[in-house]
Image: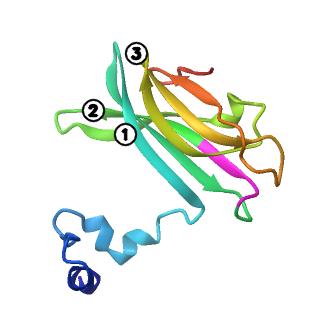
Amino acid sequence: MALALVANVACAHVPTISPIAFPAAIRQDSLSSVDARIFQVVSGGSWSDGTGNGHYRVVVSSDGAPGVHYTTILQWMGRRGLAQDVELLRSVDLKTVGTRWYSMLDPELKWSRGRWILYLDASEAPLLPATHRPSFQLGAPGDIRER
């Protein structure tokens, strides 16, 4: 709570973190369960099929020294029950789909021509900069194709 008060004093336009709205954001014990290797997380887009609907989440984690190698996982998140609780339905390591790429990061989800497309920055070998921009067409859980 002290951090939120300091933020309000320093920047009047920054909203206060409410313990009711974001209990996990201020509970110290919940912070210990966050994987320290996680580098980026992007959620967005949407999918639907005959069994349900949901959104995509992309998790990029660092595998050692920064800038050397990243693992990028695409997850299909779904909603279930009356409470519409979010659950992980399926996930895939993008390395198994885009086998040419050594490392991928900086995910971006965009709607294009009636489909959700995942764009990433990619490198072809260790220690090379991410100078390529592969894209993947997304669909229902498990439906992903490199374009």
Labelled disc at residue 114: 3
Q: Is residue 122 left or right of residue 143?
A: right
Query: Up-down: is 52 above or below 132?
Result: above
Question: Is residue 114 positioned above or below 42 on the image?
Answer: above
Which range of residues does the magenta coloring cover? 67-72
Disc number lying in front (3 or 2) = 3
On whether residue 68 falls in the magenta region, the answer is yes
- The answer for how far apart the CA atoms under marks 3 and 1 are is 25 Å
Is 25 placed left or right of 38 in the picture? left
Q: Cβ–Cβ below 8 Å for labels 2 and 1?
A: yes
Q: Pinpoint residue 118: horizontal percent, then vertical percent.
A: 53, 32
- Please, is residue 88 above or below residue 14 in the view? above
Q: Circle 1 sits on which residue?
A: 87
Tell me the element at label 1: strand
First in sequence: mark 3 or mark 1? 1
The residue drawn where x is 70% and y is 57% is 63
State the residue position of label 2.
80
Q: Give how far apart the Cα atoms at labels 3 and 2 are.
A: 25 Å
| x and y, in percent, of residue 80 in the image | 27, 32
Picture quarter with the N terminus = bottom left
The amino acid type found where label 1 is placed reads Glu
